[in-house]
Image (tube, grey):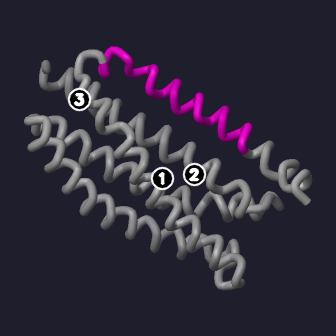
Amino acid sequence: MIFQSIRWRLPWLYINLGTAFLAAFVVGLFEDTIARWTALAVFLPIVAGQGGNAGMQTLTVIIRDMALGEITPGDGRRALTKEIILGLLNGLAIGLVVGLIGWFWKGSILLGVVAGSAMLLNQLAAAAAGVLIPLGLKSLRLDPALASSIFLTTVTDVAGFFFFLGLATAGLKWFGV
């Protein structure tokens, strides 16, 4: 029983390890930006973590609905639309809070705008991934319950880091900070 579980789970964890290095690579692309604006490092886990948690909520609802027969691949468009709207609303609400905290905590309105905007974008990415990943895995005849979280974490980490550090890089260039 244990060895069968290892056989099913360990390969996905190895895939997760590889995708974690992908996220690290994305952060590495922005080493100069982080070196110039060290306060960014404080917000990296916030942007990625919130995206991951929001995406996991979506993923859980979709997989549950799939297991109960309440959603089929044909319902994907409806589910995606609903979750994108939720991601937008959650992203605006959470992005505003994160932006204000960034501004007041670190004394930089630019940091607040960058963090809030990245949060909004990552919430949208998380919502889309939370629907598309399990439906896509199911269509490939792979178990969404085992594999979805691996891919979701990749999306929210990579997208969150890219949005946040990319916007920060652009902000530094645009405003000559």
- List x then y, in percent, for residue 2: 87, 55
Does 61 sit above or below residue 164?
below
Q: Residue at x 48, y 53 (%)?
A: 52
Q: Residue at x 62, y 36 (%)?
A: 19
- List x then y, in percent, for residue 57: 50, 66
Q: Report how far apart the C-alphas of labels 2 and 3 lie in the structure.
A: 26 Å
Disc 3 is placed on an element classified as loop
Q: Mark 2 and mark 1 in contact? Answer it, CB < 8 Å.
A: yes
Q: Quadrant of residue 102?
A: top left
- List x then y, in percent, for residue 135: 68, 64
The residue singled out by tag 2 in the image is 152
- List x then y, in percent, for residue 95: 25, 54
The mark that comes first in sequence, 1 or 3, is 3
Q: Which numbered marker is on residue 39? A: 3
| Residue type at tag 3 | Ala
The mark that comes first in sequence, 2 or 3, is 3
Horizontal relation, residue 104 to residue 154: left or right: left
CA neighbours of label 3 inside 10 A, class few (<14), some (14 to 19), many (20+): some
Main secondary structure of the magenta stretch: helix
Badge nearest the viewer, 2 or 3: 3
